[in-house]
């Protein structure tokens, strides 16, 4: 399971650590942020203790109106063993009761000068990215006409060579050999290269080349949304390949289904050009133009007329 340490959040957003230093290695397991307004009023029945708690001007203003005993009770219930951290927005003063409870429970109390809404949005986006489901697959990811194309296939089938030809034709390389994929949204997958091999491309017989150094910064991208999977395989004369394009195959990556094409590889086929056309055809389908479907309809009409 993916996790983020509180210390990483502190360093990323340059938050001020007020107290509870012994808890900075606590793990954050969810991207949800809680603003405990009802809890300040004493309702802890459904308190989501596993979330980062954000206290803003509204919560602290109400808290200040409570009696001394109520304030102590609220903060003792707010700071639990599960609570990863409590963040104060707007640079507001931290209540003494919170400092005492956080030190006893080991819950880090952090402070930022940002407004509550902005701070909540930034932390949520950061945690969603870090905690998103991820996987790593063998393949090549390229940006072709704005379409993220993931090339897969057996080793030696020509994925890297196809990517090199695409780069020469003005497209951009994202990752070669190993592609790290994360679930960025409900139906959105984003791929990138591991830091060690970023911008590098391996060509058998030539070795490893740096695409950005050879072709310039415009020839690479650090990440790209994956829209289409193209599987390269050696030509099998006994296999029947799709010649019309009516059947759309889909492959599941993490929790998302992506359109998948199978391209047979044999001498004389210009794979880079075919990948370009496949990308343009994908964009055309998204605009509502399905050439294969239109041909099928015209063919059926011709048969009926006869």
Image (cartoon, grey):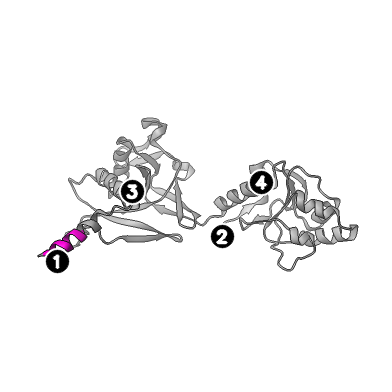
User: Mark 3 or 4 closer to N-term?
Assistant: 4
Q: Tell whether 234 sits left or right of 135.
A: left
Disc 1: which residue: 304
| Residue 236 seen by the camera | no
Q: Which residue position is annotated with label 4?
A: 119
In the rendered view of the protein, which quadrant contains the C terminus? bottom left
- Nearer to us of marks 1 and 2 is 1
- Indicate which label's residue lies in the foreground, 2 or 4: 4
Residue at label 3? 283
In this rendering, position of residue 278 left or right of residue 54 = left
Q: Main secondary structure of the magenta part?
A: helix
Residue numbers of the magenta segment:
296-305
The residue at the point 65 percent across, 52 percent down is 5
Label 3 – label 2 distance at C-alpha: 35 Å
Displayed quadrant of residue 295: bottom left
Q: Would you name the residue on which mark 2 appears?
A: 1
């Amino acid at each position: 399971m993916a996790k983020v340490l509180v210390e990483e959040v502190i360093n990323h957003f340059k938050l001020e650590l007020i107290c509870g230093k012994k808890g900075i290695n606590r793990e954050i397991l969810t991207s949800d942020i809680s603003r405990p307004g009802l809890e300040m009023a004493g309702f802890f029945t459904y308190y989501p203790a596993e979330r980062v708690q954000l206290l803003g001007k509204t919560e602290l203003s109400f808290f200040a109106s409570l009696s001394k005993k109520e304030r102590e009770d609220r903060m003792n219930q707010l700071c639990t063993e599960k609570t990863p951290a409590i963040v104060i927005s707007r640079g507001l003063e931290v209540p003494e009761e919170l400092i005492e409870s956080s030190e006893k429970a080991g819950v880090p109390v952090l402070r930022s000068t940002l407004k509550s809404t902005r701070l909540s949005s930034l932390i949520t986006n950061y945690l969603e990215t870090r905690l998103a489901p991820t996987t790593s697959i063998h393949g090549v990811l390229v940006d072709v006409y704005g379409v993220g194309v993931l090339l897969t296939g057996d080793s030696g089938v020509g994925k890297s060579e196809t990517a090199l030809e695409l780069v020469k034709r003005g497209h951009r390389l994202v990752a070669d050999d190993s592609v790290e994929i994360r679930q960025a949204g409900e139906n959105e997958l984003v791929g990138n290269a591991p830091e060690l091999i970023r911008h590098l491309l391996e060509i058998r017989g030539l070795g490893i080349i740096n695409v950005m150094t050879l072709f310039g910064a415009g020839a690479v991208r650090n990440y790209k949304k994956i829209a289409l999977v193209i599987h390269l395989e050696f030509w099998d004369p006994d296999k029947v390949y799709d010649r019309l394009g009516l059947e759309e195959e889909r492959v599941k990556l993490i929790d998302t289904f992506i359109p998948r094409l199978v391209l047979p590889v044999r001498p004389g086929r210009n794979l880079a050009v075919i990948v370009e056309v496949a990308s343009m055809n994908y964009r055309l389908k998204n605009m509502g133009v399905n050439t294969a479907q239109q041909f099928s309809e015209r063919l059926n009409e011709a048969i009926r007329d006869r």
